[in-house]
């Protein structure tokens, strides 16, 4: 590069110019980090403040994890569960088998148990000194044992109901305004006693679990009804203001004070059976009552919760310590009620900062903002340190949240801050990676511009990624002798699958020129190498058989050297058909027919060997100089082997990525070529030769058929019919083999076909702005590949001039 006659690269230093070009990239990355961090902080604060269901679900999942990490704690010994468990349900069978031996079990001989059974239990437990008895059972229907059964239960409630709680349950009632919750209450005869009524419903959180107190359910229900019915109607129709939550009712029945502040989250002591369970039938059996329960003194001054724990009764709910990875056993509803009673009485109820959503949002924004500022002070050139800093921040927040949760009884957001920090780390890593790639690209461009500078050459020599800029590969390969025989004289082309060389055969008289194609095995896997050996030997055998035809290049040798495979083929002295095709001087009809008649026997021979060429086009057909015959080249063996190595599960016929758009029919694009696919490509080539229009410039009708006959004046109907059948969109409508095409062509009188070169006429498509772009559009390239990638042996606008020499030499 010269300016005013001087070589400006001579003044380049090792750092000055590179620093000036890379500094904008570094500054841009810093700005991106700042903008993205600000966006993440704002987004995290906004979603926290909006308290949307997804965020609440994540936070409650975090709470469940913290409960379970903390582990089980000892439950209060004065709250006892009288369990209707499998053991109690099974005892009735003993009575049925031996009624005289077990008369006391008559009360539980069949399910559901009579109301008199519960009446006897209430009477016996209260006489033993229990503070209160709360039955987690809804007695909303008359007893199946008759009115006397209900009357006996009502009589006991009338006498001792002040210390008894009966359950009520809310269910949906549909109104025009929406769904309304109404309670299912105990029978009126039971409600007319001094008993207390407690609702057993809990609010179900977005994660599907119970976390908050039952009284929060009642509050949510009041708010919902006020919204549906209006405040005035709601106040006038407040159906039963005496209904408390079940736990509050149990504590009031025990005449025990409990917390009534703004805290709303249950304190869970542990998993199932953390609270002491006593099987229900123990209080019926005289021996157990005396021995296990100390004649009832066990229940003195205790709150008794009666409820189902048997799996048969299916009274289980999702909650912390239930059906999780650490605690797989489900937790019964009566166990959750016991946790609620203990939380209220012992003032263990937790406060959630999320009750004030914007306080929660400010807390999250402050923490994440501080983390972003601290992270920005760590050098971007130390990504591992930045990741460690983010990990430390996430752990620190999680640890602090856990300590505040366990020690202070306060729930602060945990999921969003930790995810936000991880988001920072991920975004920072992505930006760093992108910035690194961008810097590398800028550096590469700078080095390429000043490649003549000795300093730059020194830099390149120390960077593996840039050594190709010196083009050392070509200088190293020229003169190399492969297999002690083939001396490389020229590099025709290079690509991802391998290189193509012109070489002299030093072991033949006159050192004739041949073509050597290399297949690179990139994988270090020995299996891949063994598979390549088998595939290469198979493809070489196929090319050997095909080369016996005079119009297919002969395979001269194949061998393996330095973990690469090589094919040696005859060099054809001729001109590529694509170079002979002139849009301003198309082929005559007779020339096109003779072209077809010359190549169809070749294709028939190829198909007879069970081979599909897959890439017939003008650049793969050579017009041989000494006799003017057409030679079919480039059977794509290297590309096929590489594809199979890439996907060893692919079918043998799979050719995705082998072929050229425009010449390739639809079934081949889908990876399912057949023999008629080659006939289609040959027909399209003949159309291009006669019309002077490449495939991308040809129009198609609504059925996908090529519209071309109007471009050839005085076109012979017979020839047109043959070619149109060759290029049918539906391969079922094409000729199944080349012999049938030749038979129909022989029926034409070729000598009377026009030999005049047609003039261009008719409505032409709009010209392509760039002829090289037109070439590029005919090559299949995955959409996510860089445009600078060069597909081996394909014609693209990024091929160098020598690529055409490669195809001609093939």
Image: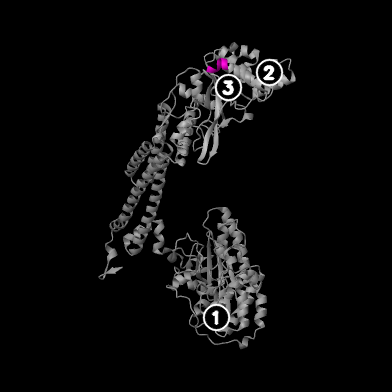
Pinpoint residue 737: horizontal percent, then vertical percent.
66, 73
Q: What is the quadrant of residue 8 in the picture?
A: bottom left
| Label 2 SS | helix
Q: Is residue 783 left or right of residue 307?
A: left
Q: What is the quadrant of residue 624 in the picture?
A: bottom right
**Pointer 2 and pointer 1: residues touching (CB < 8 Å)?**
no
As drawn, the label of residue 710 is 1
Q: Is residue 327 above or below residue 2?
A: above
Q: Nearer the viewer, mark 1 or mark 3?
A: 3
Q: Residue at x 34, y 49 (%)?
A: 35
Q: Can see residue 722?
A: yes
Q: Residue furthest left?
A: 4
Pinpoint residue 306: horizontal percent, then vertical percent.
58, 22
Q: How is the image coloured?
A: one colour
Pinpoint residue 485: horizontal percent, then vertical percent.
53, 68
As drawn, the label of residue 474 is none
The boundaries of the magenta stretch are 158-162
Question: Mark 2 or mark 1: which comes first in sequence?
Answer: 2
As drawn, the label of residue 190 is 3
- Label 2 environment density (alpha carbons within 10 Å; few <14, some 14–19, many ≥20): many
Q: Give the Cα distance between marks 3 and 2.
A: 25 Å
Overall secondary structure of the magenta stretch?
A: helix
**Quadrant of the snapshot with the N terminus:** bottom left
Query: Which of the two residues, 355 or 387, is positioned nearer the viewer here?
Result: 355
Query: Which of the two residues, 735 or 1, is positioned nearer the viewer here?
Result: 735
Q: Residue at x 59, y 63 (%)?
A: 671
Q: Is residue 734 above or below residue 714?
A: above
Q: Which residue is mark 2?
A: 105
Q: Nearer the viewer, mark 2 or mark 1?
A: 2
Q: Give the Cα distance between marks 1 and 3.
A: 97 Å
């Amino acid at each position: 590069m010269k300016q005013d006659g001087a070589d400006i690269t001579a003044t380049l230093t090792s750092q000055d110019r590179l620093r000036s070009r890379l500094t904008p990239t570094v500054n841009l990355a810093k700005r991106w980090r700042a903008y993205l961090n600000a966006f993440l902080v704002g987004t995290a604060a906004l979603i926290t403040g909006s308290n949307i269901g997804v965020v609440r679900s994540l936070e409650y999942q975090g709470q469940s994890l913290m409960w379970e990490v903390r582990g089980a704690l000892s439950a209060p010994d004065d709250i006892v569960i009288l369990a209707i468990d499998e053991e109690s349900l099974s005892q009735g069978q003993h009575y049925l088998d031996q009624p005289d031996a077990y008369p006391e079990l008559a009360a539980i001989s069949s399910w559901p148990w009579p109301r008199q059974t519960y009446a006897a239990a209430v009477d016996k437990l209260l006489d033993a000194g229990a503070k209160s008895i709360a039955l987690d059972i809804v007695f909303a229907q008359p007893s199946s044992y008759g009115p006397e059964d209900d009357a006996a239960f009502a009589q006991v409630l009338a006498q001792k109901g002040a210390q008894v709680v009966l359950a009520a349950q809310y269910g949906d009632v549909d109104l025009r305004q929406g769904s309304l919750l109404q309670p299912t209450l105990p029978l009126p005869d039971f409600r007319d006693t001094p008993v207390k009524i407690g609702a057993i419903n809990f609010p179900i959180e977005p994660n599907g679990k119970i976390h908050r107190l039952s009284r929060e359910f009642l509050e949510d229900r009041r708010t919902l009804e006020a919204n549906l019915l209006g405040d005035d109607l709601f106040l006038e129709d407040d159906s039963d203001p005496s209904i408390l939550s079940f736990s509050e009712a149990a504590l009031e029945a025990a005449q025990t004070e409990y917390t009534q502040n703004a805290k709303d989250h249950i304190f869970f002591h542990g998993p199932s059976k953390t609270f002491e369970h006593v099987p229900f039938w123990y209080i019926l059996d005289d021996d157990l009552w005396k021995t296990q329960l100390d004649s009832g003194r066990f229940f003195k001054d205790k709150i008794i919760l009666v409820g189902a724990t048997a799996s048969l009764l299916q009274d289980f709910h999702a909650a912390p310590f239930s059906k999780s990875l650490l605690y797989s056993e489900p937790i019964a509803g009566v166990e959750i009620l016991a946790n609620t009673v203990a939380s209220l009485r012992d003032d263990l109820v937790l406060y959630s900062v999320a009750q004030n959503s914007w306080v929660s949002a400010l807390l999250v924004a402050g923490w994440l903002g501080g983390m972003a500022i601290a992270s920005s002070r760590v050098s971007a050139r130390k990504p591992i340190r930045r990741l460690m800093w983010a990990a430390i921040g996430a752990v620190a927040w999680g640890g602090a949240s856990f300590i505040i949760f366990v020690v202070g009884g306060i729930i602060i957001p945990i999921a969003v801050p930790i995810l936000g920090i991880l988001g920072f780390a991920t975004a920072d890593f992505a930006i760093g990676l992108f910035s690194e790639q961008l810097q590398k690209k800028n550096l590469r461009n700078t080095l390429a511009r000043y490649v003549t500078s000795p300093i730059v050459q020194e830099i390149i020599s120390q960077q593996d990624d840039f050594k190709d800029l010196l083009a050392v590969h070509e200088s190293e390969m020229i003169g190399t002798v492969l297999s002690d025989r083939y001396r490389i004289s020229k590099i025709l082309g290079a690509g991802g699958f391998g290189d193509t060389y012109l070489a002299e055969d030093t072991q033949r008289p006159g050192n004739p020129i041949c073509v050597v194609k290399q297949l690179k095995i990139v994988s270090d896997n020995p299996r891949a190498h063994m598979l390549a050996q088998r595939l290469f030997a198979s493809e070489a055998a196929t090319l050997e058989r095909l080369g016996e035809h005079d119009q297919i290049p002969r395979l001269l040798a194949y061998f393996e050297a330095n973990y690469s495979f090589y094919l040696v083929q005859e060099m054809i002295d001729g001109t590529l058909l694509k170079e002979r095709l002139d849009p301003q001087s198309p082929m005559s009809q007779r020339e096109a027919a003779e072209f077809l008649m010359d190549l169809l026997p070749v294709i028939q021979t190829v198909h007879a060997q069970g081979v599909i060429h897959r890439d017939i086009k003008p650049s793969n057909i050579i017009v041989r100089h000494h006799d003017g015959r057409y030679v079919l080249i480039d059977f794509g063996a290297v590309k096929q082997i590489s594809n199979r190595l890439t996907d060893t599960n692919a079918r043998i016929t799979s050719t995705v990525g082998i072929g050229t758009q425009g010449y390739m029919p639809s079934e081949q694009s889908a990876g399912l070529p057949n023999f008629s696919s080659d006939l289609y490509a040959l027909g399209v080539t003949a159309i291009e030769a006669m019309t002077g229009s490449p495939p991308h410039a040809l129009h198609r009708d609504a059925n996908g058929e090529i519209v071309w006959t109007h471009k050839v004046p005085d076109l012979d109907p017979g020839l047109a019919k043959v070619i149109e059948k060759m290029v049918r969109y539906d391969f079922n409508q094409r000729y199944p083999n080349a012999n049938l095409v030749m038979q129909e062509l022989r029926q034409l009188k070729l000598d009377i076909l026009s030999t005049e070169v047609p003039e261009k006429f008719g409505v032409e498509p709009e010209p392509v702005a760039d002829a090289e772009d037109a070439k590029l559009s005919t090559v299949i390239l995955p959409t996510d590949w860089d445009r600078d990638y060069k597909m081996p042996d394909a014609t693209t606008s990024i091929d160098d001039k020598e690529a055409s020499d490669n195809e001609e030499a093939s």
